[in-house]
Amino acid sequence: MQFRTDSRSGKELSALGFGCMRFPTSGGRIDVDASERLIVEAIDRGVNYLDTAYMYNGNEAALGEIFTRNPGLRERVHVATKLPVAHCEVTADFDKYLERSLERLRTDHIDYYLVHNVTSAEAWSRLASLGFEQWVNRQKEVGRICRIGFSYHGPKADFLVLLDSFDWDFCQIQYNYMNEDYQAGTAGLMAAAERGLPVIVMEPLLGGKLAGDLPKEARSALSDAGISDDPARLALRWVWDHPEVTVVLSGMSTQEQLLQNIETADTALPGSLQGAEVVAVELAREHIARSYKVPCTGCGYCLPCPKGVNIPMCFAAYNTSFAHGWYQGMHQYITASGAMVGEARFASDCVKCGACIEKCPQHIRIPDELTSVKRRLQIPGLPALVRLGVKMMSR
């Protein structure tokens, strides 16, 4: 296993982190036995970073059960979990959710604790107003939290604001070869590294869409480069090629996925991507981008929307629904709405005021395109369904 150094703590972290959100299931529930086999093998092979969250239904409890079944296993890994910021209304909620996570995980401390799913600078400001900074410092003093960070799902400009808003120990961003200009993107990765922050990467395969579900033309481009048998390996190698990346999370639900990713992680050193692989990525990216319907670059110049609509992320979700499938687009659309961190804002909230049109350097007729987003992704009753889903997950 390749290890990379946490530049803040000096800890050696496995380049491959285990994303526990996609534990194997049986009958709609987490299969703890199957998950245990994967976790134990992953740790035995060098993986030492496990990522879960309060909001991942049953996930923390399953991981805690695995630790109990295997004495000494907890001490061999760094556990990351996340605070459900949308449910924190008063300062006392910070203690409530941390204590629940500790109980579920059957541990007395969290190695890497994240503010979950920050989508804007305003979301952070609300949290800070509840005394979050002082609370974190107290938790660090008593040893319940070792390092504090945040996972990000907002516009590029706000990411830079977040980086400088607090003395963070690390951050987590979505990053892959299709998301260089999406959310934090490459600029955010570099900005975090310049500040000396370790960067944890999520969605390196874009929810699996850069593995088995590539568009036909993109797969042909990889075939021409002689690497059509394993697009997932190429996508992971592309992320690990960046020395600014500390850990890449992968949601592995089978032994085959685990072994393949470990093998890839062992040799994917920064700067090791070969010329043919670089060309193949560029070609695949071009073919995928051609299936996009709205030429939005994610610059964020159209923001803020008077009605709070996250316009770039709505368009990113819309484009994804054509390039990688409706389900993946819908997943991004719900994230873009901000539903997980407060009151959701959907494309349907656009009142066609036109304030965004003159700001757009791509000259996109934004209100008209938001109507298209609504037609494709906003199924009847979506806001109510999202609220219900968030409530269920927070139990």
Image: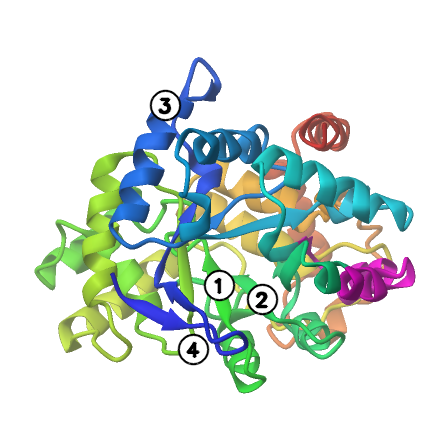
Find out whether residue 131 is within the magenta segment. Answer: yes
The Cα atoms of the two marked residues, 2 and 1, are separated by 6 Å
How crowded pointer 4 is (Cα within 10 Å; few <14, some 14-19, many 20+) is rated as many
Of the image marks 4 and 3, the number of the one nearer the N terminus: 3
The Cα atoms of the two marked residues, 1 and 3, are separated by 27 Å
Instruction: Name the mark nearer the viewer: 1 or 3.
Output: 3
Of the image marks 2 and 4, the number of the one nearer the N terminus: 2
Residue under numbered circle 3:
33
Residue under numbered circle 4:
244
| Snapshot quadrant of residue 93 | top right
Q: In this view, does 1 lie above or below 382?
A: below
The three-letter code of the residue at mark 4 reads Glu
The three-letter code of the residue at mark 1 reads Ile
Of the image marks 1 and 3, the number of the one nearer the N terminus: 3
Residue segment shown in magenta: 115-138
Q: Do the residues labelled 3 and 2 touch (CB within 8 Å)?
A: no
The Cα atoms of the two marked residues, 4 and 3, are separated by 35 Å
Residue extending farthest to the front is 71
User: For the residue labelled by badge 4, is the local secondary structure a helix, a strand or a loop?
Assistant: loop
User: For the residue labelled by badge 2, is the local secondary structure a helix, a strand or a loop?
Assistant: strand
Q: In this view, does 196 lie to the left or right of 230?
A: right
